């Protein structure tokens, strides 16, 4: 496992599905990865993937962009990078260090 992903797993208590999604997004060369692409690649239930993606988006480890919207339906693409993961980790670790320094 990538060291950044390993640290993220410990800091954010990522589950196996979340780890697999990040690994897939980091390895794929496509910039247009949808939920269906992730579901098909990982062979997991769409609801499971959606829950994991929601958590990863909230943490900031992945990002979502609109791809196309037709009528009431919007399709999103998902991506991440080692740079993004490092940025999120740096922010979290800085916050943790401040908490340590401010504790008595």
Image (cartoon, rainbow, N blue to C red):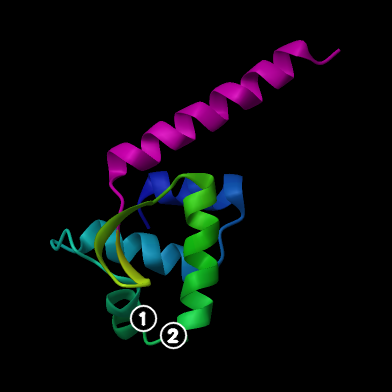
- Judge from the rendering whether residue 30 lies leftward or rightward of residue 100; answer left or right: left
Q: Could you classify mark 1 by the number of other residues whose Cα lies within 10 Å: few (under 14), some (14-19), or many (20 or more)? A: some
Q: Residue at x 33, y 62 (%)?
A: 23
Q: Earlier in the sequence, mark 2 or mark 1?
A: 1
Q: Residue furthest left?
A: 29
Q: Residue at x 31, y 50 (%)?
A: 80
State whether residue 16 appears in this view: no
Q: Residue at x 72, y 20 (%)?
A: 99
The C terminus, quarter of image: top right
Q: How many marks?
A: 2
Picture quadrant of residue 86: top left
Residue, disc 1? 39
Which x, y percent locates residue 12?
Answer: 59, 49
Determine if the magenta segment contains residue 87.
Answer: yes
Per the rendering, the mark at residue 44 is 2
- Judge from the rendering whether residue 73 lies leftward or rightward of residue 27; answer left or right: right
- Judge from the rendering whether residue 13 lies leftward or rightward of residue 27; answer left or right: right
Q: Residue furthest front?
A: 71
**53 lies above or below 44:** above
**23 lies above or below 11:** below
Q: What span is colored magenta in the figure?
A: 78-104
2 and 1 marks in contact (CB < 8 Å): yes
State whether residue 38 appears in this view: yes
**64 lies above or below 102:** below
Element carrying mark 2: loop
């Amino acid at each position: 496992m990538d060291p950044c992903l390993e640290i993220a797993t410990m800091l954010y208590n990522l589950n196996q599905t979340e780890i697999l999604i990040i690994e897939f997004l980091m390895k794929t060369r496509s910039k247009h990865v949808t939920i269906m692409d992730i579901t098909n690649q990982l062979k997991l239930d769409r609801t499971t993937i959606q829950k994991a993606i929601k958590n990863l988006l909230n943490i900031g480890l992945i990002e979502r962009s609109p791809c196309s919207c037709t009528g009431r339906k919007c399709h999103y693409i998902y991506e991440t990078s080692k740079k993004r993961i490092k940025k999120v980790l740096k922010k979290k670790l800085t916050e943790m260090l401040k908490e340590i320094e401010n504790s008595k």
